[in-house]
Image (spheres, helix red, strand yellow):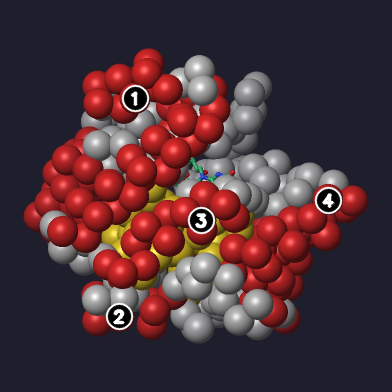
């Protein structure tokens, strides 16, 4: 099913994310993880794509596994380090497998990477255009940044670029992770003012160990509220307590989003079925209202 259909009527949706393995011998493991996560009834499940294209084959494999489990897959696709032919090949494979949802991304800039004048894709909007030109029936989503993309001069420019990207045919947006809902509320309001009217799915990352947060902040540029730092100070040295505190913090964030009328939630579950289970368990009676 297309994500645009799933998001219709502002019903509550909760989606999960998995990443593909780097090596063939881990493929079966990841497929088992997908099967386990599908038991917790996500509205759809996304699968990431390696920036340098290294795990692109596995992305389609995993998206297929999600589909085989009866859940709608959303296949990520990055373009910065890809040729136009490679993009056509991957989109063709997705079409051949009946996968109709693509999250069109630029990808992070690899260290030492140099932009070439004739480079085909410099930004995600070009990938959106390319996919839509190949097949206008594919449902295309894109990324957005409640705390501004790290390369952007400022928020006004970032949102102007976002609007241009959406106008290329983006049907929904998923946010970068954020730990302070106020950042999301402000961003959403700004998008409304600027006329960005597609559904915006709030991306929530459950932080289940203290090391993970350092890495997550480095990658995402997301700020961490004092409340979360205090949780880390208190429980960071005890893995079990930290994990439970991280799950509860993410669950509370989701409940607060819903209480403020935001019904579309994406959980960066990564490949952790136990985290998906715990959060869905906490939300079950709220979701099935
Ligand atoms: P863009 O939309 O191209 O934006 C990148 C920067 O360029 C922004 O600063 C923007 O303001 C600016 N910009 C946009 N258009 C123009 C223009 N015309 N002229 C000048 N500047 C412009 N990475 C992966 O490698 N694999 C994944 O699977 C993956 N999944 C992700 C999922 C989500 C929900 C998110 C939020 C991120 C994901 N990423 C993934 C990371 C993503 O690739 C990086 O954040 C990347 O740095 C930007 O990607 P983008 O698609 O937002 O790029």
Vertical arrangement, residue 138 with respect to residue 276, above or below: below
N-term mark: 4 or 2: 2
Q: Is residue 23 visible?
A: yes
Q: Is residue 130 visible?
A: no
Mark 3, residue position: 276
Q: Position of residue 211 (x, y in %)?
A: 54, 23
* 3D distance between C-alphas at marks 1 and 2: 36 Å
N-term mark: 4 or 3: 4
- Helix, strand or loop at mark 3: helix
Q: Is residue 253 left or right of residue 151?
A: left
Of badges 1 and 2, nearer the viewer stands: 1
Residue 174, disc: none
Q: Is residue 109 left or right of residue 22?
A: left
Q: Is residue 68 left or right of residue 26?
A: left
- Helix, strand or loop at mark 1: helix
Residue drawn at the location 68% of the way across and 68% of the way down: 35
Q: Nearer the viewer, residue 99 or 65?
A: 65
Q: Nearer the viewer, residue 272 or 219?
A: 272
* 3D distance between C-alphas at marks 4 and 1: 34 Å
Mark 2, residue position: 8
Of badges 4 and 3, nearer the viewer stands: 3
Vertical arrangement, residue 253 with respect to residue 130, above or below: above
* 3D distance between C-alphas at marks 3 and 1: 21 Å
Where does the C terminus fall, quadrant-wise?
Answer: bottom left
Mark 4, residue position: 26
Mark 1, residue position: 231
């Amino acid at each position: 099913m297309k994500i645009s259909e799933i998001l219709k009527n502002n019903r509550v949706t909760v989606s999960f994310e998995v990443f593909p393995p780097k090596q063939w011998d881990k493929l079966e493991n990841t497929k088992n993880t997908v099967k386990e996560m599908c038991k917790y009834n996500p509205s759809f499940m996304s699968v990431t794509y390696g920036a340098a294209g290294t795990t692109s084959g596995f992305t389609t494999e995993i998206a297929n596994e999600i589909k085989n489990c009866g859940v709608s897959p959303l296949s990520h696709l990055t373009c910065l380090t890809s040729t136009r032919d490679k993009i056509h090949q991957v989109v063709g494979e997705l079409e051949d497998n009946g996968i109709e949802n693509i999250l069109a991304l630029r990808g992070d800039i690899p260290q030492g990477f140099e932009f070439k004048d004739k480079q085909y894709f410099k930004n995600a909007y070009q990938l959106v255009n390319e996919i839509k030109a190949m097949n206008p029936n594919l449902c295309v989503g894109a990324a957005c940044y409640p705390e501004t993309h790290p390369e952007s001069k400022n928020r006004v420019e970032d949102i102007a670029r976002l609007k241009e990207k959406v106008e290329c045919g983006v049907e929904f947006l998923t946010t970068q992770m954020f730990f302070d809902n106020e950042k999301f509320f402000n961003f959403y309001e700004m998008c409304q003012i600027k006329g960005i009217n597609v559904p915006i799915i709030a991306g929530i990352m459950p932080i289940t160990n203290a090391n993970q947060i350092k890495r997550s902040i480095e990658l995402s540029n997301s700020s961490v509220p004092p409340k979360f730092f205090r949780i880390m100070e208190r429980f960071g040295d005890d893995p079990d307590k930290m994990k439970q505190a991280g799950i509860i913090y993410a669950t509370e964030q989701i409940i607060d989003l819903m209480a403020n009328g935001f019904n579309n939630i994406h959980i960066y579950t990564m490949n952790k079925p136990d985290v998906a289970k715990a959060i869905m368990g906490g939300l079950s009676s709220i979701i099935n209202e």
